[in-house]
Image (cartoon, helix red, strand yellow):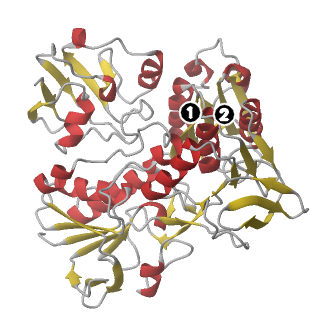
Amino acid sequence: MPKVSYQLPDGTTHDLEVPCGQSVMDGSVRSNLPGIVAECGGGCSCATCHVYLEEGASFFDEPTDEERELLEFAEDARPNSRLSCQLILTESCSGVRVTVPDSNG
Amino acid sequence: MTGRVLVVGAGHAGATAAGLLRQAGHPGPVELFGDELDLPYQRPPLSKKFAEGQLEQWLRPAEFYREQDITVRLGEQVTAIDRDRRCVRTDTGRAHGYEHLILATGAAPRPLPVPGSGLPGVVSLRTLADARVLRKCVEERRALVIVGGGYIGLEVAAVARANGVAVTIVEREDRVLARVASPRLSEILAAHHQGQGTRIVTGADVVRIDGDDRVRAVVLGDGGEIPCEAVLVGIGATPRDRLAAEAGLVCAQGIVVDAQARTSDPHILAIGDVTRRPLSTGSLVRLESIPSATEQAKQAVAAITGAPPVAPEVPWFWSDQFDLKLKIAGLVPPGPGTVLRGDPASGRFALFHHLGGIVAAVESANSPAEFMAGKKFIASGTRIDPARLADATVPVRDAVIQ
């Protein structure tokens, strides 16, 4: 099962196994980690699952226009900002690492 | 503080609060009471995706509650609050004590008070069970009349039309979304629905529903009849504040709470659709939306755990209708200036409502950047140049007056 490393605003790091087909958001919500609010349940609607994708960008599809637009005005957006609901894990994912910003709704 | 927290109501607000309590490290017992027998679920798909096999979306898997040490009591109905003894009583006859009580009892569909509204085939939409009935109606291609042109009605109309069902919307006001959207958005969305074959009848009162063992027609005040095989009543919802009112908490069509979700009893908080809550502008409103429920869940948990108050958020919600992903932020003020950016005919547009250039609300379709920018403008009281904002070739941020 792919592993994802979440670095949280409080400085702690959590390494989770997330089943293939689920998203980086799902993994966080499932383990009740703070910071990824996921208001819309993963519909690319709300931008409350914003993360910085530190490692593993090559495993995921490029952001859609919709995701790009949501991120353009998200709090504290950076070049490696992604919506974690759009980061779907596959068998080939390894060493995925994200940082959760302090500013998610 | 190791007090026991009872959460009454297992909808989005209640389930979120229970999870957030553990996230915040609350050490005491957490118990979640739900009237329904289903585990907490996502409610948006009930009107947006009920025909697609994506109806049942659990907020969390069953193991989540076990792992997080949250006791879930489904089907056990809280019947009274004893504030002096600090306990609730349930329909099993048991009493459950609390240190903090969170009321998240939601809202109930407003019934249509006309003869025939109890006929088989007349449904409302609030629960998974309701949505399953509606899904069956759509699968059987039953001609559908929707009473009430609100967001629920329009979302269901879109799904039903997309599945080939004949749909008529009957609205009492002179436009759909009369209470919740700007006239311009109403007009654009009505045209969009009509273009998809939905019939919209405005300024019409339903006086009777005819049928025998099954609904047959909706009868209007002018005597007109609309034949149908199913009726959805979507004329709004009323807050389920009876428990609170009977316990003597201050209510005014909803449990009145402050910006930290506190009621008039220091041991009782209230969140979600059941509340009448303040906005940062000071006005008290009832918001029926997931972002508001989530925000209030955070407020309640901060109040219980002694964390700093959470920063206020701009109210917003979303709606999906056909190919339109609508996102709306802020409350449209009376008599605003309105800037249209984009082209409604292309399905990609945003309406910015402003007072003297200060943005108060944005209603957007398939325009995430405009929505996010608008929400920021509202939060920060940004002044925009209406002419530049209306020009889609000018980037949104360049319409800001520094």
Which sits in the foreground, B31 or B3?
B31
Report the Cα–Cα distance between label 2 and label 1: 7 Å
Residue B309 seen in this snapshot: no
Chain label for disc 2: B
Could you tell me which residue is drawn at 55 percent across and 42 percent down?
B139
Could you tell me which residue is drawn at 33 percent across and 62 percent down?
B10
Which sits in the foreground, B346 or B169?
B169
Q: Which of marks 2 and 1 is nearer the N terminus?
A: 2
Name the residue carrying label 2. Answer: B352
Percent coordinates x, y for residue B78 in the rendering: 33, 78
Which sits in the foreground, A80 or B216?
B216
Q: Can you say whether B214 is above or below A74 in the image?
A: below
Report the residue that reaches farthest toward the front: B213
Q: In which quarter of the image is residue A62?
A: top left
Chain label for disc 1: B
Q: Can you say whether B201 is above or below B351 in the image?
A: below
Quadrant of the frame with the N terminus of chain B: bottom left
Residue A28 seen in this snapshot: yes
Which secondary structure lies at badge 2?
Answer: strand
Name the amino acid type tagged 1: Gly
Report the residue that reaches farthest toward the bottom: B84
Mark 1: few/some/many CA within 10 Å (<14, 14-19, 20+): many
Q: How many marks?
A: 2
Could you tell me which residue is drawn at 68 percent across and 26 percent down?
B385
Percent coordinates x, y for residue B384 in the rendering: 64, 29
Mark 2: few/some/many CA within 10 Å (<14, 14-19, 20+): many
Quadrant of the frame with the C terminus of chain B: top right
Name the residue carrying label 1. Answer: B374
Q: In this view, does A15 lie to the left or right of B108?
A: left
Name the amino acid type tagged 2: Phe
| Contact? badges 2 and 1 (CB < 8 Å) | yes
Which secondary structure lies at badge 1?
Answer: helix
